[in-house]
Amino acid sequence: MTQTEDALLVERSLGGDELAFADLVHRHQRLVSRRVYRLLGRSLDHADAVQEVFLRAYNSLRRYDRNRPFEPWISRIATNYCIDELRRRKSGKVMLWTDLEEGEQHRLLAMSRNGDFEPLLLEGIEKYQEVAMSLMQDLRPKERVAFVMREVENRSYSELAGTLGISELGARIRVSRARKKLQAKFQAYLAGFGKLER
Protein backbone atom coordinates (compact mmCIF):
# COMPACT_ATOMS: atom_id res chain seq x y z
CA MET A 1 0.00 0.00 0.00
CA THR A 2 1.38 3.37 -0.93
CA GLN A 3 0.86 6.84 0.37
CA THR A 4 -0.71 7.76 -2.97
CA GLU A 5 -3.26 4.94 -2.73
CA ASP A 6 -4.28 6.06 0.76
CA ALA A 7 -4.55 9.68 -0.40
CA LEU A 8 -6.81 8.60 -3.27
CA LEU A 9 -8.99 6.58 -0.90
CA VAL A 10 -9.25 9.59 1.42
CA GLU A 11 -10.22 11.79 -1.54
CA ARG A 12 -12.90 9.34 -2.62
CA SER A 13 -14.15 9.03 0.98
CA LEU A 14 -14.51 12.79 1.23
CA GLY A 15 -16.49 12.64 -2.00
CA GLY A 16 -19.01 10.31 -0.35
CA ASP A 17 -17.65 6.92 -1.43
CA GLU A 18 -18.32 4.72 1.62
CA LEU A 19 -16.51 1.77 0.06
CA ALA A 20 -13.32 3.82 -0.16
CA PHE A 21 -13.38 4.48 3.58
CA ALA A 22 -14.17 0.80 4.20
CA ASP A 23 -11.02 -0.01 2.20
CA LEU A 24 -8.99 2.38 4.39
CA VAL A 25 -10.37 0.65 7.49
CA HIS A 26 -9.49 -2.75 6.06
CA ARG A 27 -5.94 -1.65 5.24
CA HIS A 28 -5.21 -0.14 8.65
CA GLN A 29 -7.40 -2.19 10.98
CA ARG A 30 -4.57 -4.44 12.15
CA LEU A 31 -2.38 -1.48 13.14
CA VAL A 32 -5.23 0.19 15.05
CA SER A 33 -6.33 -3.04 16.69
CA ARG A 34 -2.81 -3.84 17.92
CA ARG A 35 -2.28 -0.32 19.28
CA VAL A 36 -5.59 -0.43 21.18
CA TYR A 37 -4.85 -3.94 22.47
CA ARG A 38 -1.35 -3.06 23.67
CA LEU A 39 -2.42 0.10 25.45
CA LEU A 40 -5.79 -0.91 26.87
CA GLY A 41 -5.35 -4.66 27.17
CA ARG A 42 -7.83 -7.39 26.49
CA SER A 43 -11.40 -6.40 27.07
CA LEU A 44 -14.91 -7.08 25.88
CA ASP A 45 -15.12 -3.63 24.35
CA HIS A 46 -11.99 -3.97 22.19
CA ALA A 47 -13.99 -4.01 18.94
CA ASP A 48 -15.92 -0.94 20.10
CA ALA A 49 -12.65 0.89 20.83
CA VAL A 50 -11.28 0.10 17.37
CA GLN A 51 -14.55 1.24 15.81
CA GLU A 52 -14.41 4.48 17.82
CA VAL A 53 -10.89 5.17 16.51
CA PHE A 54 -12.08 4.81 12.92
CA LEU A 55 -15.14 6.95 13.64
CA ARG A 56 -12.85 9.69 14.96
CA ALA A 57 -10.68 9.31 11.87
CA TYR A 58 -13.71 9.57 9.58
CA ASN A 59 -14.92 12.70 11.36
CA SER A 60 -11.43 14.25 11.06
CA LEU A 61 -10.75 13.17 7.48
CA ARG A 62 -10.97 16.74 6.12
CA ARG A 63 -8.00 17.69 8.34
CA TYR A 64 -5.80 14.86 7.04
CA ASP A 65 -2.85 16.20 5.02
CA ARG A 66 -2.81 14.03 1.89
CA ASN A 67 0.86 14.85 1.34
CA ARG A 68 1.75 12.82 4.42
CA PRO A 69 1.45 9.08 5.09
CA PHE A 70 -1.90 7.89 6.41
CA GLU A 71 -0.52 5.27 8.82
CA PRO A 72 1.12 7.70 11.30
CA TRP A 73 -2.02 9.84 11.21
CA ILE A 74 -4.38 6.97 12.09
CA SER A 75 -1.85 5.68 14.61
CA ARG A 76 -1.89 9.04 16.37
CA ILE A 77 -5.69 9.02 16.50
CA ALA A 78 -5.62 5.51 18.02
CA THR A 79 -3.00 6.53 20.56
CA ASN A 80 -4.89 9.66 21.58
CA TYR A 81 -8.08 7.64 21.95
CA CYS A 82 -6.27 5.21 24.26
CA ILE A 83 -4.82 8.05 26.32
CA ASP A 84 -8.30 9.53 26.69
CA GLU A 85 -9.69 6.14 27.67
CA LEU A 86 -6.94 5.52 30.25
CA ARG A 87 -7.58 8.93 31.79
CA ARG A 88 -11.33 8.27 31.82
CA ARG A 89 -10.83 5.02 33.66
CA LYS A 90 -8.84 6.91 36.32
CA SER A 91 -7.50 3.81 37.98
CA GLY A 92 -6.12 2.64 34.66
CA LYS A 93 -6.50 -0.69 32.96
CA VAL A 94 -3.88 -3.11 34.14
CA MET A 95 -2.13 -5.00 31.39
CA LEU A 96 -1.93 -8.67 32.27
CA TRP A 97 1.11 -10.76 31.51
CA THR A 98 -1.12 -13.06 29.48
CA ASP A 99 -2.19 -10.08 27.36
CA LEU A 100 1.35 -9.81 26.01
CA GLU A 101 2.73 -11.88 23.16
CA GLU A 102 5.66 -14.15 23.98
CA GLY A 103 8.21 -11.82 22.38
CA GLU A 104 6.83 -8.89 24.34
CA GLN A 105 7.12 -10.86 27.58
CA HIS A 106 10.79 -11.55 26.84
CA ARG A 107 11.47 -7.87 26.16
CA LEU A 108 9.95 -6.87 29.49
CA LEU A 109 11.94 -9.51 31.31
CA ALA A 110 15.10 -8.31 29.57
CA MET A 111 14.77 -5.02 31.46
CA SER A 112 16.63 -6.71 34.27
CA ARG A 113 20.31 -6.70 33.42
CA ASN A 114 21.39 -9.08 36.17
CA GLY A 115 19.04 -12.01 35.75
CA ASP A 116 17.07 -10.96 38.83
CA PHE A 117 13.95 -12.67 37.52
CA GLU A 118 15.08 -16.22 38.24
CA PRO A 119 13.03 -16.39 41.47
CA LEU A 120 9.96 -15.47 39.46
CA LEU A 121 10.65 -18.21 36.93
CA LEU A 122 10.65 -20.76 39.72
CA GLU A 123 7.23 -19.66 40.99
CA GLY A 124 5.35 -20.25 37.75
CA ILE A 125 2.84 -18.35 35.67
CA GLU A 126 0.69 -17.22 38.63
CA LYS A 127 3.48 -14.96 39.88
CA TYR A 128 4.09 -13.61 36.39
CA GLN A 129 0.45 -12.59 36.22
CA GLU A 130 0.51 -11.03 39.67
CA VAL A 131 3.60 -8.95 38.90
CA ALA A 132 2.33 -8.00 35.44
CA MET A 133 -1.01 -6.84 36.86
CA SER A 134 0.75 -4.11 38.78
CA LEU A 135 3.50 -3.49 36.23
CA MET A 136 2.02 -0.57 34.34
CA GLN A 137 -0.65 0.52 36.81
CA ASP A 138 1.25 3.52 38.14
CA LEU A 139 2.41 4.81 34.77
CA ARG A 140 0.72 7.92 33.44
CA PRO A 141 -1.16 7.26 30.19
CA LYS A 142 1.43 9.04 28.02
CA GLU A 143 4.27 7.19 29.78
CA ARG A 144 2.48 3.91 29.13
CA VAL A 145 2.08 4.83 25.46
CA ALA A 146 5.74 5.80 25.21
CA PHE A 147 6.91 2.58 26.88
CA VAL A 148 4.67 0.30 24.81
CA MET A 149 5.53 1.98 21.51
CA ARG A 150 9.29 1.96 22.15
CA GLU A 151 9.89 -1.21 24.16
CA VAL A 152 7.09 -3.48 22.99
CA GLU A 153 6.43 -2.29 19.43
CA ASN A 154 10.08 -1.30 18.77
CA ARG A 155 9.07 2.08 17.26
CA SER A 156 11.66 4.79 16.67
CA TYR A 157 11.86 7.84 18.90
CA SER A 158 10.97 10.05 15.94
CA GLU A 159 7.79 8.02 15.28
CA LEU A 160 6.95 8.12 18.98
CA ALA A 161 7.48 11.89 19.01
CA GLY A 162 5.22 12.30 15.99
CA THR A 163 2.48 10.15 17.48
CA LEU A 164 2.50 11.99 20.82
CA GLY A 165 3.03 15.42 19.28
CA ILE A 166 6.21 16.10 21.27
CA SER A 167 9.88 16.55 20.47
CA GLU A 168 12.18 13.56 20.05
CA LEU A 169 13.91 14.58 23.28
CA GLY A 170 10.52 14.60 25.01
CA ALA A 171 9.86 11.09 23.69
CA ARG A 172 13.21 9.86 25.04
CA ILE A 173 12.45 11.42 28.43
CA ARG A 174 9.02 9.75 28.61
CA VAL A 175 10.45 6.34 27.77
CA SER A 176 13.27 6.81 30.27
CA ARG A 177 10.85 7.78 33.05
CA ALA A 178 8.62 4.79 32.29
CA ARG A 179 11.62 2.42 32.33
CA LYS A 180 12.84 3.80 35.65
CA LYS A 181 9.41 3.46 37.25
CA LEU A 182 8.97 -0.09 36.01
CA GLN A 183 12.48 -1.12 37.03
CA ALA A 184 11.93 0.36 40.49
CA LYS A 185 8.70 -1.61 40.83
CA PHE A 186 10.44 -4.82 39.78
CA GLN A 187 13.32 -4.22 42.17
CA ALA A 188 10.94 -3.48 45.06
CA TYR A 189 9.03 -6.65 44.32
CA LEU A 190 12.21 -8.71 44.11
CA ALA A 191 13.53 -7.22 47.36
CA GLY A 192 10.31 -8.23 49.10
CA PHE A 193 10.50 -11.66 47.49
CA GLY A 194 14.02 -12.18 48.83
CA LYS A 195 12.94 -11.33 52.39
CA LEU A 196 10.12 -13.87 52.24
CA GLU A 197 12.53 -16.60 51.14
CA ARG A 198 14.99 -16.17 54.03
Image (cartoon, helix red, strand yellow):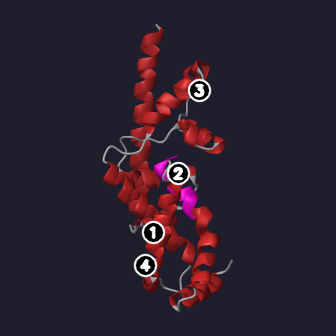
Numbered disc in front, either 1 or 4: 4
Tell me which segment is drawn in magenta. 32-43
| 183 in relation to 5, above or below | above
Residue visible at 56% across and 42% down in the picture: 99
- Provide residue 5's location: percent of width, then percent of height: 65, 84
Residue visible at 58% across and 87% down in the picture: 17
Q: Mark 3 points at which residue?
A: 125
Q: Name the residue under label 1.
A: 77
Q: How far apart are marks 1 and 4 (CA)?
A: 11 Å
Q: How far apart are marks 2 and 4 (CA)?
A: 24 Å
Crowding at dot 1, Cα within 10 Å, few <14 / some 14-19 / many 20+, comes out as many
Question: Left or right of 65: which side holds 34?
Answer: right
Let me know if residue 40 is in the magenta part: yes
Of callouts 3 and 1, the N-terminal one? 1
Residue visible at 65% across and 44% down in the picture: 103
| 153 in relation to 168, above or below | above
Q: Kindly state the secondary structure of the residue where label 2 is placed.
A: helix
Question: Left or right of 136: which side holds 88?
Answer: left
Q: Kindly state the secondary structure of the residue where label 4 is placed.
A: helix
Of callouts 1 and 4, the N-terminal one? 4
Label 2 amino acid? Arg
Q: Name the residue under label 4.
A: 59
Q: Mark 2 points at which residue?
A: 38
Label 1 amino acid? Ile
Crowding at dot 2, Cα within 10 Å, few <14 / some 14-19 / many 20+, comes out as many
Q: How far apart are marks 2 and 1 (CA)?
A: 15 Å
- Evaluate if marks 1 and 4 touch, with contact meaning CB atoms under 8 Å apart: no
Of callouts 2 and 4, the N-terminal one? 2
- Provide residue 144's location: percent of width, then percent of height: 43, 50
- Evaluate if marks 2 and 4 touch, with contact meaning CB atoms under 8 Å apart: no
